[in-house]
Image: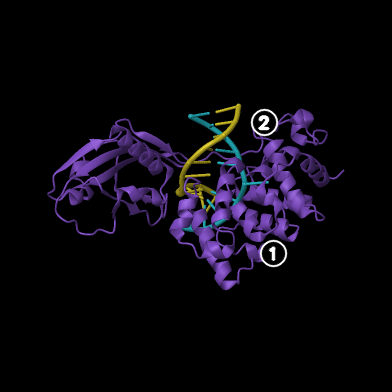
Chain colours: A purple, B yellow, C cyan
Amino acid sequence: MKFSKKLITWYLQNKRAMPWRETKNPYHIWLSEIILQQTRVAQGLPYYLSFTKAFPTVFDLAKAEEEKVLKLWQGLGYYSRARNLHATAKYIAEELNGVFPSNYKELLTLKGVGDYTASAIASICYNEAVPVVDGNVYRVLSRYFNIDTPINTPKGVKEFKELAIELMDHEEPDAYNQAIMEFGALQCKPKSPYCIICPLNDSCMALKKGTVDQLPVKLKKTKIKKRYFNYIIPVINDTYTIINQRTGNGIWQGLYEFPLIESEKTDIDTIASHSLFTKMIKDKPYDIIPHNNEPIVHKLSHQHLYTRFFILKIDDESVFEASEEMILMRDVHSYPVPILIGNFIDSFFSKELTSS
DNA sequence: AATCCGGGGTC
DNA sequence: GACCCAGGATT
């Protein structure tokens, strides 16, 4: 039997039930594919459910405030996905009358839709014979054909893409693409794949050569940078606080955080003289209390953030000049924030409750 | 071609 | 601690 038909046979017997497998609506397929980029099914599933509930159609998503989209996306990471998701929804609703592009080439022009996602949508929704090449496919193909070309190089990308095109099942593009990915996720796993019971074990080249656990080959990633974040949490008259939205390039674009003083190493002596701090204080009486003495290490793909939070209590009977950054403390939960900040907020408010 | 962009699961 | 996840955009 053909490679593709073996995979499809395996798939029909082993596939997991998922809500996006019960529809071919391009809006729902697109949404699921964006959510699942670099994200496990178990982690993405609740987000898919909340998004489809909050935004039943692309028009609902398009007319939402971007902040609401980011808030729903909170905790999923790679927040440019959420911003691109929203931009593309607006484009499709306003420019395309809500009708999704119906082929691979046109899908590729959408923000946040690359080669993988365009192939996934085109094959699932429109039965176009374009192969997906995701992390699962790299693993399955590199093992089955015993290919040691590094997958994260232009040469590797090209080689595996060409191989995937040859292997593509033109009769059942949808089933084949989902089959090879599901096969990679459940059967041909990164660690301890089930080669003994594998339906392809009579023809897998890596199994024959004994190289299964060495494939796929991936070049080393770059070094992780250490950064030192000192967050100042103003508590003004026990009522107000201050948050800012992160702009420009860098992590957490569009999300909110408390006033941040980034320092070299974990040196906190400079905080009291930092302009951001003195500006908040002005001549008002204040009290500053460290929330955590040991830095909280928040790990991102490329950065480790050594983080300390400082509660800055300010009492001032005079009327504050209305700052755009000043908000009611009790409203802090309504803003989209990174997990690091969200965890702090949770611990801070539970501490407030138990101590009062 | 290399780097950036999250958070969580697994071993 | 290292690696991975239904990748894409930017430089």
Measured Cα–Cα span from mark 2 to mark 1: 37 Å
Q: Residue under circle 1?
A: A103
Residue positioned 82% across, 43% down in the render: A9
Could you tell me if residue A85 is visible in this image? yes
Question: What percent of the width, then of the height, locates residue A138?
Answer: 67, 43
Question: In this rendering, would A147 be left or right of A9?
Answer: left
Could you tell me if residue A163 is visible in this image? no
Which mark is first along the chain, 1 or 2?
A: 1
Residue positioned 49% across, 51% down in the render: A72
Q: Which quadrant would residue A150 be assigned to in this image?
A: top right
Q: Is residue A98 above or below residue A125?
A: below
Q: Tag 2, which secondary structure?
A: helix
Q: Tag 1, which secondary structure?
A: loop
Residue positioned 64% across, 63% down in the render: A107
Q: Name the residue type under label 2.
A: Asp
Question: In this rendering, would A240 be left or right of A21?
Answer: left
- Name the quarter where the C terminus of chain A is drawn: top left
Q: How many marks?
A: 2
Q: Residue under circle 2?
A: A213
Neighbour class for label 1 at 10 Å: few (<14), some, many (≥20)? some
Q: Is residue A24 above or below residue A142?
A: below
Q: Which quadrant would residue A139 be assigned to in this image?
A: top right
Q: Which quadrant would residue A25 be assigned to in this image?
A: bottom right
